[in-house]
Every structure is written in C-alpha cells, then in structure tokens.
Image: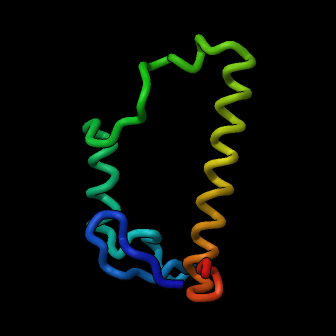
C-alpha cells in the first residue's frame, strides 16, 4: 500500500519492506522525531488535565474518540472504494 509521507508528502510504501514507514526515509523520520522533541507538535490541553477529569468526563471523551475513529475509518473506506462509496 502506498501512503503519503507525513513530513514531505512523497509517496512511500507502507509495508515491512520500508523500515521507516510511514515515512519515506530515515531523514523524514528524524525530522518528525525532532518536531516532537522540540515541542513542534503539541497535544491540546493543559499538562495533567486528564488527571482532573471525572470518570464520567473520561467516559464521554472515550466515546467521542471512538465515534471519531469510526467516522474516519468509514471516510477512508469510502475514499478507497472510489465511486462505489459516493452518494448519488
């Protein structure tokens, strides 16, 4: 399966034959790692904010995450199916 490299967008093979998957090269893999290491990428929210959530809030967040994942999977499946997944 071919996927776009998350760093440069070059098409890369996503299989065991590509040791840097999903990246196209070791260079792109290291660039991505460097972004995480220098806070170039951040996860929304204050540090430790999940520790202050009630069990109900955590459950709601987990349900929303599962719904979003299912929606994204369905969208990806429709994209892969091309015309068969389009509405008329």
Q: Residue at x 30, y 64 (%)?
A: 7
Q: Is residue 27 above or below residue 88?
A: above
User: How did the renderer colour the structure?
Assistant: rainbow
Q: Residue at x 33, y 43 (%)?
A: 36
Task: Estimate the x, y position of residue 51 in percent, counting from the top left.
Answer: 59, 15
The N terminus: image quadrant: bottom right
Q: Nearer the viewer, residue 50 or 85?
A: 85
Q: Is residue 28 above or below residue 45?
A: below
Task: Estimate the x, y position of residue 29 in percent, counting from the top left.
Answer: 34, 62
Q: Left or right of 82: which side holds 11?
A: left
Q: Is residue 13 above or below residue 26?
A: below
Figure disc tally: 0
Task: Estimate the x, y position of residue 52 in percent, counting from the top left.
Answer: 59, 11
Q: Nearer the viewer, residue 4 or 35?
A: 4
Q: Residue at x 70, y 29 (%)?
A: 60
Task: Estimate the x, y position of residue 46 in percent, counting from the top left.
Answer: 42, 19
């Amino acid at each position: 399966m071919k996927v776009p490299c998350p760093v440069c967008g070059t098409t890369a093979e996503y299989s065991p034959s590509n040791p840097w998957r999903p990246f196209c090269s070791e260079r792109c893999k290291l660039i991505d790692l460097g972004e995480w290491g220098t806070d170039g990428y951040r996860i929304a929210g204050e540090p430790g904010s999940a520790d202050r959530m009630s069990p109900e809030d955590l459950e709601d967040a987990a349900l929303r995450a599962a719904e979003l994942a299912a929606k994204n999977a369905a969208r990806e499946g429709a994209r892969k199916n091309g015309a068969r997944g389009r509405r008329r």
